[in-house]
Image (cartoon, helix red, strand yellow):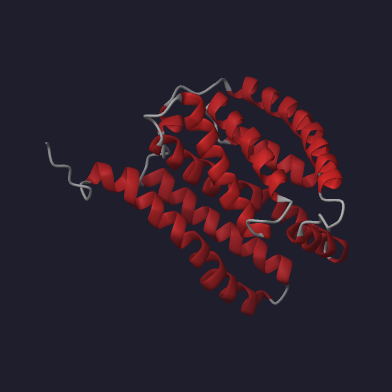
Amino acid sequence: MRKTNLLNVKNLKKWILPIIILISYKFLFYKMISYIVINRAGDFSKSILIGNFIVAIILFLLIKFIFKGKLNSIDSSEKMDLKKSIVISIVVLFLTIGIIYGVMWIQSVIFSHIGLNSSNADAITKEFKSNPLPVVGLSFVTSTLEELVYRQLLFGYLYDLFSGCNKYIRFITASIVSSIVFGSIHNGVFHPYMLFYVTSGIILSSLYVYTKRLSSPIIVHILHNLF
């Protein structure tokens, strides 16, 4: 059997470095940058906005110069025409809103005996009422950063990891696992709102795979958050 050196340049970039980036993302943002920025800026929403922006720039530069903008096999595929992908993204946005409202209605029926509010959404809404401008800016920066981390990095990593599976199992597994990780960070694994995160995660992952452009789920994510 041929030996494989996991530490060679190709394997390091494809399998090991993405995991290191993903793990360090939470530490880098919440433990270091947020602490520094909050101490300097004072204002919570502004500090989170600046912190997200700094981390997004760092992540973008890593992907741009280390991975040449091709973090996974999706990025390496032929991309859909930009104008067409934008139109499709707008259509998907309206479909997403309809589907999400349907999911929320199902949640209200199934979990009628418990509160369904997202602690993350409640915190953002409360902050928006007192300080709207930074929160609007946060919608743009955070949505972009989250798509970089949870769609391009995590979903893309899992999508390639399961490349030997049936294409449907490959996609569903990668999209559900990445969505659960994303949702658990916001509200916890067993929160009823997880159904929302999994549904939106599958939609955004589908859009990413279909257009081969990360900009497509970013557009939908930003507009949905603003809506």
Q: In this rendering, does residue 147 appear at all?
A: no
Position of the N terminus by quadrant: top left
Q: Is residue 134 left or right of residue 126?
A: left
Q: Is residue 106 left or right of residue 29?
A: right
Position of the C terminus by quadrant: top right
**159 to 53, vertically: above or below:** above
Horizontal and vertical percent position of residue 30: 56, 68
User: Residue at image x 47%, y 25%?
Assistant: 167
How many numbered marks does the figure carry?
0
Q: Is residue 28 left or right of residue 53?
A: left
Q: Nearer the viewer, residue 175 or 212?
A: 175
Horizontal and vertical percent position of residue 47: 66, 68
User: Residue at image x 47%, y 39%?
Assistant: 156
Residue sitting farthest toward the bottom: 39
User: Residue at image x 53%, y 72%?
Assistant: 31
Q: Nearer the viewer, residue 19 or 187?
A: 187
Location of residue 85 (image quadrant):
top right
User: Residue at image x 26%, y 41%?
Assistant: 10
Horizontal and vertical percent position of residue 48: 66, 65
Horizontal and vertical percent position of residue 141: 64, 52
Q: In this rendering, does residue 15 appear at all?
A: yes
Q: Is residue 110 left or right of residue 200?
A: right
